[in-house]
Each structure stands twice: as structure tokens, then as C-alpha cells.
């Protein structure tokens, strides 16, 4: 019997008629989590208390990266397999010599907008993680993830997302992974620098490497985790950053110009 990974209701209580993409379809996502009910699936695509929809924010931010990877592809544009990305929120310049990213003027007047976008990015990253964990490992209902449900689905409290800054502008990524993005969890043989830790989960998405806690009391284990992950990444990454703002992620892949 299907049981929603978010609200924990079963198909005897709620409907599971719609396909729940773990990564937004508008971002090229194809993976489906069958254990997401229609109400929770719709929630992530709707406005909540004047916050931008989580799926829209994830699509907006990571399509910038996706477009940068695909900008030399011949199959992007009108009447071609992949449509050209046009942003709602951001003014994007993907000039190969000096890429830049800023909020469009009409949104820049809202002083809280960048804070809202930052929070929605974090909630969206947790959302993708939990649904992919359920799809790949079948353990998304574990009670240790209840705090993730509270944050991503019910907008309660606040939890960190960490971002690893690369040392070099060399990113090994298949164009198939760019056209149809996947989320690679720690332990994946393709990403050997992702470590396994009992209280944190690392994953790679569109060339970006993130870490989130899998324990509500993550700060108790932070020092131990930081030592382990820093050693594993010393040859590839220069620092770990706490995400508060959309520009804390190198969405335009400026590292490729270094």
C-alpha cells in the first residue's frame, strides 16, 4: 500500500493519482517517487504564505546551471528538443568570459525577497533529497527524517544546507545527466568524494555538491563530520559554505572560467 513520504497518509486516506517528480519536470527531471500523495505533490508547486513555489524556485535556480552546461548544444531553442530557459526571477548573463546573476529589478525592491528565495532553495533541496532517498533506498519514512518533513513540507523551523566550493573548473558530468538531472547520493560509485556519515548526507546535483544533516541534533556531530569530509575533499574542493542566499551557490558556474 502506498504511503506518502510527507504526510504519512495511505492510499486509503488520500489520492495518489498524479506523478510526483523528485526533480521538477520543468528542469528535465524524469524520476518519479510513487509515495507522494496528490495533496503534498501539489503543495510544492503552489504559493504558500506569499512564498514563491518551491518547485518554481528549484527550476529557476538550477536551470541556470543546466543552461550553462548546455549552451553549446545544438538542440536548444525554438522547435528543438530542449527549450531555451527564460527566468522569472533572475537576470542571467551566461557570457563564457564573465557569467553573472542578479535578481530582476521588479523583485529587487522587496528586501525580503532574497531571504525568501534562499529559504525556498533550501526547502527544495531537502524535498529532492527525501523523495530521492525514498525512491532509491526505500527508507524515506524513517522517523529520523521527521524534521525534514516539518521543514520542507510544513515550513517549520530552519535547517542548514552546506555547499562545497570547487578548487578547479573541471566538472566531470555526462550531458545525459544535465538534460535529465539525477541526484547522486553518497556511496554512489560515480562520486567517490561523497562520504557516508551517520548524521549527514552528501549528494551531487548538476555538478553542485551539497550536504544536509540527517539528524535534528546535527550540531552535536558537526566537528567530527567536518574533519571527515574535509579530508575526503581536500584535492577537489576548497571550502564548505552555509547557504543563506541564492548567490552562495555558483549557479552560473563561474568556476569554469578559472
Image: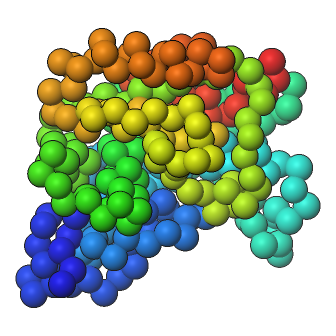
Q: Is 207 on the left-hand or right-hand side of 158?
A: right
In the picture shown, does residue 102 fall above or below 146? above
Q: Position of residue 205 (x, y in %)?
A: 55, 45
Q: Residue at x 34, y 32 (%)?
A: 197
Residue 10 visible in this rendered orientation of the protein? yes
What's the residue at 43%, 72% (across, down)?
A: 32
Q: Is residue 174 above or below residue 100?
A: below
Residue 113 visible, this orientation: no
- The quadrant holding residue 236 is top right
Observer-nearest residue: 186 or 21?
186
Q: Where is residue 248 in the image (x, y as percent from the top left)?
A: 51, 23
Is 155 left or right of 108, judged from the image as shown? left
Left or right: where 94 falls relative to 41: right
Q: Residue at x 87, y 25 (%)?
A: 97
Indicate the position of residue 36 as horizontal and vertical percent values.
28, 71
Say which quadrant the N terminus sits in: bottom left
Q: Quadrant of residue 81?
A: bottom right
* Quarter that holds the C terminus: top right
Who is closer to the viewer here, 166 or 42? 166
Amino acid at each position: 500500500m502506498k504511503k506518502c513520504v510527507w504526510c504519512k497518509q495511505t492510499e486509503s486516506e488520500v489520492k495518489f493519482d498524479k506523478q510526483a517528480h523528485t526533480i521538477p519536470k520543468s528542469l528535465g527531471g524524469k524520476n518519479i517517487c510513487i509515495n507522494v500523495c496528490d495533496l503534498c505533490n501539489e503543495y510544492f508547486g503552489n504559493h504558500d504564505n506569499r512564498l514563491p513555489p518551491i518547485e518554481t524556485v528549484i527550476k529557476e535556480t538550477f536551470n541556470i546551471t543546466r543552461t550553462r552546461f548546455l549552451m553549446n548544444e545544438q538542440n536548444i531553442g525554438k522547435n528543438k528538443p530542449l527549450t531555451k530557459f527564460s527566468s522569472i526571477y533572475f537576470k542571467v548573463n551566461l557570457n563564457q568570459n564573465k557569467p553573472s546573476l542578479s535578481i530582476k529589478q521588479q523583485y529587487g525592491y522587496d528586501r525580503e525577497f532574497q531571504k525568501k528565495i534562499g529559504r525556498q532553495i533550501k526547502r527544495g533541496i531537502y524535498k529532492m533529497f527525501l523523495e530521492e532517498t525514498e525512491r532509491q533506498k526505500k527508507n524515506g519514512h524513517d522517523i529520523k527524517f521527521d524534521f525534514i518533513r516539518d521543514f520542507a513540507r510544513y515550513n517549520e523551523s530552519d535547517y542548514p544546507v552546506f555547499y562545497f566550493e570547487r578548487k578547479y573548473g573541471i566538472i566531470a558530468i555526462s550531458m545525459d545527466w544535465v538534460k535529465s538531472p539525477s541526484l547522486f547520493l553518497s556511496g554512489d560509485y560515480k562520486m567517490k568524494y561523497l562520504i557516508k556519515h551517520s548524521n549527514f548526507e552528501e549528494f551531487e546535483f548538476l555538478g553542485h555538491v551539497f550536504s544536509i544533516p540527517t539528524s535534528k541534533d546535527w550540531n552535536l556531530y558537526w566537528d567530527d563530520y567536518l574533519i571527515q569530509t574535509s579530508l575526503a575533499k581536500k584535492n577537489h574542493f576548497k571550502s564548505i559554505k552555509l547557504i543563506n542566499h541564492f548567490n552562495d551557490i555558483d549557479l552560473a558556474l563561474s568556476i569554469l572560467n578559472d
